[in-house]
Image (cartoon, grey):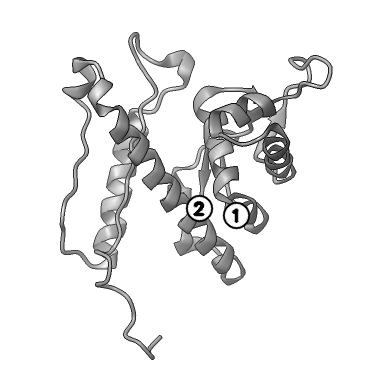
Amino acid sequence: MAASSAVPGRDIELDTAALRVLAHPMRLNVLNLLRERGPSTASRIGDELGINPGAASYHLRRLASGGLILEEPDRGTGRERWWKSAHRQSIHDPATVPAEEHEAGLAYTHTVALAAADRLRRAAQEVPLLPQEWLDVATFSDFLLHLAPGDVDRLRAEIFEVISRYRHEESEAPEGASPVTLQVQAFPLPGTALPVAGEE
């Protein structure tokens, strides 16, 4: 998501340290789970993601050290610690970051792409089980466009503007609403935009 669409206090523009924390696929999955399902514990997250509670706790601590999640001290009992996401979404716009963040940004972008592919795979497995009302409106569309980078930039901005009109806090969501994932992916057709061998 472009930085220009960030909402102060609700969204975070990732700095180099946060990019490095989120370049780990499991940590990105943990953060996404907290954003999608609400506060949770290491044990619950471990069960959901198929990792042991110790590993989940380690990833939670790393996310907390990066300012991405917060502990809910009033909710825990004994050794059980509850965690919640500190922000609605993470913002990283490669076009606006300083050169020193480039490497961390590449690793983060790679991880985000892998996570999106995994989420799409899981959604595909559930397609046969969806109620008809959701099957009627769900879309798995793929378009082949011939665009220059500037065209993609404008298209992306227009799409993000439309999405912003449909964003509601959970408490403001209309009756019958469910969390809906809208993946926006725009990238060169694999193999068509890579530099020629030996050239940079």
**Residue at (60, 44) in percent of width and height:** 27
Q: Secondary structure at mark 2?
A: loop
Which residue bears the numbered disc 2?
92
**Residue at (59, 51) in percent of width and height:** 24
| Count of residue discs | 2
The reply to whether dot 1 and dot 2 touch (C-beta < 8 Å) is yes
- Does residue 41 appear in this view? no
What amino acid is labelled 2 in the image?
A: His
In the figure, is residue 102 to the left or right of 130?
right
Residue 43 image-quadrant placement: top right
Camera-nearest residue between 128 and 66? 128
Residue 133 horizontal/vertical position (percent)? 20, 16
In the figure, is residue 98 to the left or right of 62?
left
**Residue at (71, 44) in percent of width and height:** 62
Residue 113 horizontal/vertical position (percent)? 41, 52
Closer to viewer: mark 1 or mark 2: 1
Instruction: Specify few, some or many for label 1: CA neighbours under 10 Å numbering under 14, 14-19, or 20 or more.
Output: many
Which residue bears the numbered disc 1?
19
**Residue at (54, 49) in percent of width and height:** 25
Task: Say whether disc 1 or disc 2 marks the residue closer to the N-terminus.
Answer: 1
Above or below, 94 relative to 191 = above
Q: Secondary structure at mark 1?
A: helix
Question: Where's the C terminus, which quadrant?
Answer: bottom left
Residue 184 horizontal/vertical position (percent)? 32, 45
